[in-house]
Each structure stands twice: as C-alpha cells, then as structure tokens.
Amino acid sequence: MKKWIAILLALVLCLGLLTACGSKAEEPAAEESAAEEPAAEAPAESGETTTFTVGFDAEYAPYGYMGEDGEYTGFDLEMAEAVCEIYGWELVKKPINWDSKDMELNSGTIDCIWNGFTVTGRENDYTWTDPYVDNSIVWVVKSDSGIETEADLAGKNVVTQSGSSAYTALTAEEDNDENLALAATFADLQSVADYNTAFANLDSGLVDAIAVDIGIAQYQLNSRNDDSLKMLDEPLSTEQYAIGFKLGNTELRDKVQEALNQLVENGTFMELAEKYELADMVCLGK
C-alpha cells in the first residue's frame, strides 16, 4: 500500500511541474505576438486629393442626368471628368437631393456642387469658381394654352423645383417686390423634387406653367418630336452658373478653376458645350 501511495504522490508532483512549465512557456509567446503586430498606418495628408466627389441633381438634363446606357452623364459631369483627367483624380459622381445640398457639402460628403448651380443670390454662401454659363429662368407652357405673357399666368397653377433659383425668385422677400407680386396672382405655386416631375405634371394638365432654367427648358423641348410645349419670350430673371465649394475652400476651388481655364484654352470646354447644345449660353473665356 505504501508503495502505491508513493507512486501516486510522484505522479501528482510531475503533473504540477508540467503545468507550471506550460504557463511559463505561454508568457513569452504573448509578448512575441504583441511585438510582431504592425503599427497603424498614418492618416493621409489633409491636402492630398485622390478623389473628387461632385454632388449633382440626377434629373437635371443636360447638366447631370442618367443616360440611356444607365450611366450618369451631362455637360457638367463631362467637364468634371475632364478636370479629373488633368490632375489624375478619381471622379465620384454622387446624386443628391437638391434640398440637402448644403448638408452634403458642409459634412464633407461631397467636394462641390456642380450641376447648373446658380450664383445669383448665393454669392456669399459658397466659394465659387468663375461663372461658366449665362442662364435665364423662363416659363414653359402648353402651346395651345393661350398663355403668351407673364400677365396671362394670373389664376394659373405654376410649378418649379423645390430649392431652385426659380423658386427663390418667386418667393424670396428681399428686393423682390415685382416677382412676389407676380406670384401672388397665381392660383397656386407648387414645388416638386425635380423637373422631370414638373414636366410630367404639365403634360398631364395638373399645372399650367413651369418656371425653369432655360438650359433645362431647351433640352426638354428639343427632346420632343412635337410642338406641344413652348417657352414664353419674357424670362422671369437672368442668372449665372458656377461651381460651388464650401465657404473658405479656396485651395480646391483654385485648382478646379485652373483646370477649367486649361479646358477653355484647348477647346474641350466649347466642344462639350456644342455637344449639349449650350454653346450660345457659355460665358467662361469670353
């Protein structure tokens, strides 16, 4: 019996020694693992730009819209592509809700607003490039509506895009007595999310007239194979388009402006203007 007790004690002692040795062997392994962990990569320099994210209204032809191939295109987006080619940037086309454009810009989700963006009335709200398109806000009505002048809009239902310069022209109270008086004669002034909806409402008879930028109006009329719609001769107002950056972001604005000037000099700017039937409206380089 004593012999068996001695053997059992010896086995317990050996197991204790093995456990202790195992614990000591694991500690250096943990230290070695910590030493081999790679250091975190340093963040990219704040001035480095590898992507250029353009915020645009995806239903604002011919400046920005979805083409028949399912890809976003337009005068402004092709110009942005040409700018990115000069600097080797990657263009990111980001459709935005026009009412949320300031939130997108100020949060850094987009680098600029480039999509038929009106300077007039917003001069101090953004950092702008030089204007590149002279634009007017015009009236589009049905050809058989009997509406020939602004005075004929009295008692009519008028629509425009929410947050657009046309909407501002008809609702802003500062130095705008004439347009406010005109809007007061309407039966109703409606706003919709995009101009495609506005034209659909005009076609269906839900509204009598659209207040819209002339470039959009010309594109819509030219894309139709009939004379069902027309523009009135008298515009609501005149304005200019430019590219809007977050207020104070002069560094990126200056780089884009420099590239735009190169595109004017090498003829790319006018080629694209002619492609989108805007040659009579562009002003950059003139």
Image (cartoon, rainbow, N blue to C red):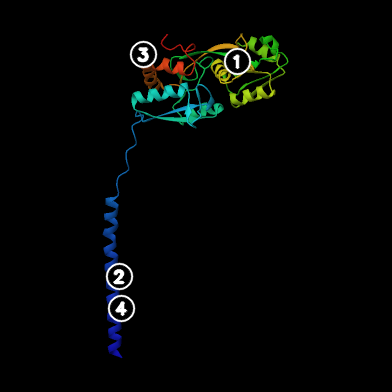
Q: Earlier in the sequence, mark 1 or mark 3?
A: 1
Which numbered tag is attached to residue 265? Answer: 3
Q: In the rendered image, which quarter is residue 31 located in? A: bottom left
**Crowd rating for badge 3 (residues with CA inside 10 Å; few <14, some 14–19, many 20+):** few
Which of these two is toward me, 169 or 76? 76
Residue 33 in picture, x, y percent from top left: 29, 54
Indicate the secondary structure of the residue bearing disc 3: helix
Which numbered tag is attached to residue 19? Answer: 2
- Residue 126 visible in the shown view: yes
Q: From the image, state whether disc 1 or disc 3 is nearer to you.
A: 3
Amino acid type for the residue under numbered disc 2:
Thr
Quadrant holding the C terminus: top left
Work out which residue is located at the far front of the displayed protein and give it. 225
Q: Earlier in the sequence, mark 4 or mark 2?
A: 4
Q: Earlier in the sequence, mark 4 or mark 3?
A: 4
Residue 201 in picture, x, y percent from top left: 66, 24
Which numbered tag is attached to residue 12? Answer: 4
Amino acid type for the residue under numbered disc 4:
Val
Residue 158 in picture, x, y percent from top left: 67, 19
Amino acid type for the residue under numbered disc 1:
Ala
Q: Residue at x 67, y 12 (%)?
A: 182
Q: Are the two marked residues, 4 and 2, in contact with CB atoms closer than 8 angstroms?
A: no
Give the distance between the C-alpha atoms of the residues marked 2 and 1, in whole angstroms: 84 Å
- Residue 246 visible in the shown view: no
Q: Is residue 224 above or below residue 16?
A: above
Q: Are the two marked residues, 2 and 3, in contact with CB atoms closer than 8 angstroms?
A: no
Q: Are the two marked residues, 1 and 4, in contact with CB atoms closer than 8 angstroms?
A: no
Q: Residue at x 36, y 25 (%)?
A: 85
Give the distance between the C-alpha atoms of the residues marked 1 and 4, in whole angstroms: 93 Å
Which numbered tag is attached to residue 169? Answer: 1
